[in-house]
Image (cartoon, rainbow, N blue to C red):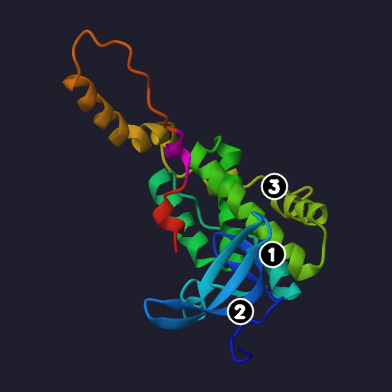
Amino acid sequence: MSDTKFQIDQNVVYPSQGVGKIIEIFEKDFKGNTLLYYKIHITASDMIVMVPVERAEELGIRSIVSAEEAQKALDLLSDDFEPITSDWKLRYQQNLDLLKKGSVSDIAEIVRCLYNRSKVKELPILERKLYDSAKKLLEDEVCFAMGLSEKEVESLIHTKLEPLGAAPKVKHIIEEDDDDDDDLMDDVNTDEKTRKSSRSDEDDEDDDDDSPGDESSDDDFDSDDFDE
């Protein structure tokens, strides 16, 4: 097992999940074959994941970056950037793609993009969740890479996003006349509402006691985007 890329007790990054520690490398039978697995404890969620060693690279599992790379990611937060599209669907998909790629600079780009977007207009629910997740991922890796506390890293990130005396960057965001963020949840829920309407039409006309379904899952990330 010494020939595996990662070793027991090594800290690694699992894209979209966060920093974890390899607590075991073991063999397991799968459909008649014996495969080698990493057992990883994800720190932030206190979750255990088991990943086939041969798929680790495909899933983007990587080592914690160096302190120098972590500092570059922090510096990226205050760099100039290209205008942010107001098309929430495109913006959201672009940031999801970055999240799945999972490099520390990709995560920093998501934080920078959505933070500056929020300075123009409050983020819709899906993007706010994405921002919170990306910020937590960035904080966790920088903590490990630079040996700093969570509070110290939170302060560093805030300072980079809001440099003292720096000019506001909202001019980098506005690029069109119409912004359809207000329609975000309508678009997300359209299919569900259509299905409910169809079911309602088939019910007896005197049945007025149906309760609305639980739509809380509509606010979550698409599971296909994260399920590896």
Q: Main secondary structure of the magenta part?
A: helix
| Residue shown at 58% from the left, 40% from the top | 118
Task: Report the side of 56 relative to 207 (left or right).
Answer: right
Q: Residue 207: tell me if it is visible.
A: yes
| Residue shown at 49% from the left, 42% from the top | 126
Q: Please say if 27 is above or below 170.
A: below
Residue type highlighted by circle 1: Glu
Query: Given this view, does label 2 or label 3 mark the residue nearer the observer?
Result: 2
Q: Write down the residue under mark 3.
A: 167
Marks 2 and 1, the one that precedes in the sequence: 2
Residue type highlighted by circle 3: Ala
Q: Secondary structure at mark 3?
A: loop
Q: CA distance from mark 2 to mark 1?
A: 22 Å
Quarter holding the C terminus is bottom left
Q: CA distance from mark 1 to mark 3?
A: 29 Å
Query: Given this view, does label 1 or label 3 mark the residue nearer the observer?
Result: 1
Q: Write down the residue under mark 2.
A: 25
Please tell me whether residue 90 belongs to the stretch shown in magenta.
Answer: no
| Residue shown at 36% from the left, 31% from the top | 186
Count neighbours of disc 1 (C-alpha within 10 A) and say few if under 14, some if 14 to 19, many if 20 or more: many
Tell me the tag on residue 41.
none
Q: CA distance from mark 2 to mark 3?
A: 50 Å
Quarter holding the N terminus is bottom right
Does the residue at mark 2 contact the one at mark 1 (Cβ under 8 Å)? no
Tell me the tag on residue 141.
1
Residue type highlighted by circle 2: Ile
Q: Which stretch did the figure color magenta?
A: 216-220
Please tell me whether residue 219 belongs to the stretch shown in magenta.
Answer: yes
Residue 13's quadrant in the figure? bottom right
Q: Position of residue 178 (x, y in %)?
A: 39, 35
